[in-house]
Amino acid sequence: MAYTEQRTDRSGRTVHVGRYRVDGRLRSTRQMASRRDALAEARRQEEAGKRSEWIDPAASRVTVAEWFGTWQAGRADRAPRTLEAERERFRTLVAPHFGGTPLRRVTHEDVTRWSATMTAGSGDVASPARRRDAVRLLVALLDAAVDARRLPANPARSASGKVTALPRAPKTKPHRYLTHDQLRRVADAAGPPGTPSRTLILTAALTGLRWGELTALTTADVDPLRGRLHVTKAWTRLDDGTLLLGDTKTHARREVPLPAAVAADVVALTTGRAPSGLLFPGATGAPLRRESFDRSAFRPAVRAAGTAVAVADGLVTRLLSDDDAAAPALRTAGRLVYDDALAGRVRRIQAARDLRPDGVCGPETWAALAELDREFRADLTRGEKVSRTRLLAALSRTTLTPGAEDFDTLTLHDLRHTAASLAIAGGASVKAVQRLLGHESPMLTLSTYAGLFEDDLDAVGDLMSAGFTATAAPPAPETPRLRAVT
């Protein structure tokens, strides 16, 4: 039963301390001037103990920074990149405001104000995405403190449990997708058939593997008999550039189909290599770096393939000086299209160079255009001449047919989106796409690529209409009219 004790503090004043029992141990409240207040507090604490809601006041005296260290120590099984991102976010955004604050001193108003005015290291207000991630980290920290019985409730949450201070989600960058024709153009611009650069791009765009998963593939992960790739591990890059080999993003192993279009080239890369050898190694045999491949192979290939129609149109227009050649090529959404007019102008150049006048800008036609283009390079610098030679060399491996379109630049991760797009366009179900991409659930796949399934709604509507129409009763046959006999 709760009671009070009278004591004298350091200044000689009389104070009162409430005494109560929780879990069989006698405990004390803080010192209070009023005996009534001390007794009321002791009774509240004792009742909380009976309801299993008692919180040790000493446990909530640790600072937010101290609790973050304890919390992260219990998350050692998480991916190194995840832990590193949490440490960076806490150091730059959370710690400057809450690092030295005891857990019990954090208030809902403090969190709300901090969320709206959070500043980065430069002193500027952090971006909505950074602020949202930082608030989520603080909420997770305080939720863990509640679970560890260091706080009675999470001050970052409202009474109903909502996080009202969470900044609005930023608009995500729209996904970029390549068509089969555009993908072939990028792959061809990257290198001749069988080269590692071309094979890597096609494998990424036809299997949907993440970069870390793709570059962690070994010879043993290729199963040519079953046409499968075994995805068992992935590289993780830390901020200091260190690469760590570990589990995949979802910590799950999976198999993905190895398309026949690239299977022969993939199998050829395994020839003469040890089972543990990397399928796509770097120049020195070390793991291939994303930034290195992007700079040396992928970005130049995308630049060439994405502007192929514009380059062809510019070359043909300059080589043909009549008025017909000056007509601009067709544009769709601001991008040039290889239309019939451009194909007709290409046929004129093909005929003049004794090539088959089919209007298709293939390797032979590109070679002829490159040869003619050398006559117009007098005003270019040496660097510009080298860049143009490399551009036309890459384009000489591509083929443009009527209907081909230029496209905007894209990233290596957009090849993963392309894989999802091509699979859905080919009729793959949500579950199949989920397994291909290694998502944790079909809901994640559907929410990520919902826009690609819109055509399914049209198909469902047609099926529903056809089924309903099929149940309609056939029209009654017309009864022939009999003429009156007179």
Image: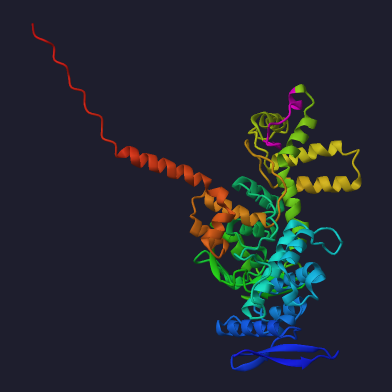
Q: Position of residue 133 (x, y in %)?
A: 71, 64
Q: Residue at x 11, y 10 (%)?
A: 484
* Quadrant location of the N terminus in the rendered image: bottom right
Question: Which residue appears at 64% of the width and 30% of the height?
Answer: 340
Quadrant of the rendered image containing residue 376: top right
Q: Is residue 332 magenta?
A: yes
User: Can the viewer see residue 286 in this picture?
Assistant: no
Magenta stretch: includes residue 290: no
The stretch of residues the image draws in magenta is 324-337
Residue 168, located in which quarter of the rendered image? bottom right
The quadrant in which residue 478 appears is top left
Which residue lies at the image location 61% right of the left edge and 85% below the top edge?
A: 46
Compared to residue 235, the image places residue 413 above or below, namely: above
- Going by the image, does 172 lie left or right of 434? right
Q: Is residue 197 visible?
A: yes
Which residue is at a point 53% across and 51% down the rendered structure image?
Answer: 424
Above or below, comparing residue 174 to residue 471 in the picture = below
